[in-house]
Image (cartoon, rainbow, N blue to C red):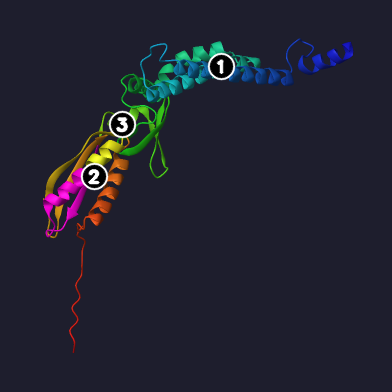
Amino acid sequence: MQGVLQFLKGIFINRNEDLTILGKLVKIVIIFLLVRIAIRVLNALINRTMERRNKLRFGMDDRKANTLAAILKNLGKYVFYFIGLVPALELFGIKTTSILATAGIGGLAIGFGAQSLVKDVITGFFILFEDQFSVGDYVKIDGYEGIVEEMGLRVTKVRGFSGELYIIPNSNIQIVTNSTKGAMRALVEVSISYEEDIDKAIKVLEDISKKLKDREDSIVEGPTVLGISKLGEYEIGLTIVAKTKPMEQWRIERLLRKEIKEAFDNNNIEIPYPKRVVIEKKA
């Protein structure tokens, strides 16, 4: 048994009582595993805290909680990896104290290059605590439109409706249009021919609006028939408007159009469309 222990010791420790290359690699693996465990524990604590935020009276909604959790997890990950990197470098004789001193001397040289990184991080915290937008919000950021998928220390990721992923540095975010704040407008325009009874058409639209309001909890206000909004060349335009919960406006518009089409068919109200009359002269 003693011989086995000596053999194992010889693999990991040399005659000078220093770690061999294999010993150093094993120690680095152990450090890496400890860092991974620490990150998982931190993530679990963050998730648990966010789940209990109502009891702790944090006073934030789910989207803001998810955003804050993502940023804290990223920050914790970077901190733990840095803590693990220092002893790993020292195992190979790289003095981290001299590196830090050199970094202090050369700080001015790299300062300009790090400015954008610092600006990204600072802007990210301002976005979070000013509640400009959160994970899950539908936003338009400097022309890029979609759902906020992730907010990190450096970048914000927005998923477009076609599946494209926009990765936007936080410091580049200038103008934000957030369509998830407050009630949204659903607007539907429908046309009838000049031969139709306007009052009858408006009454049908009002009945549709009332039934939809009673059926859909996502409607905050309306739908309201605004009356005649257009006198076209071949049609009269009528407009219906409603206010809905965030991200529900498009679904309500689709429902309104479907209900209007069915109701107009049942009441013999014509929706005009381009027609071509062909007159064939007999020879």
**Observer-nearest residue: 250 or 153?**
250
Q: Residue at x 80, y 14 (%)?
A: 9
- Mark toward the start of the polypeptide (1 vs 2): 1
Vertical comparison of 210 with 83: above or below: below
In-image side of 208 versus 168 (left or right) = left
Query: Total label count?
Result: 3
Q: Position of residue 166 (x, y in %)?
A: 40, 37
Q: Which residue is mark 3?
A: 180
Looking at the rendered structure, the kind of residue marked 3 is: Thr
In-image side of 65 versus 202 (left or right) = right
**Observer-nearest residue: 30 or 19?**
30
Image quarter hosting the N terminus: top right
Element assignment for label 2? helix
**Observer-nearest residue: 112 or 152?**
152
Q: Which residue is mark 2?
A: 208
**Picture disc at residue 41:** 1
Q: For the residues labelled 2 and 3, say whether their Cβ atoms are less than 8 Å apart.
A: no
Q: Nearer the viewer, mark 1 or mark 2?
A: 2
Q: Residue at x 33, y 30 (%)?
A: 172
Q: CA distance from mark 1 to mark 2?
A: 54 Å
Q: Position of residue 162 (x, y in %)?
A: 40, 45
Q: Among all residues in the image, which is located at the extreme bottom? A: 283
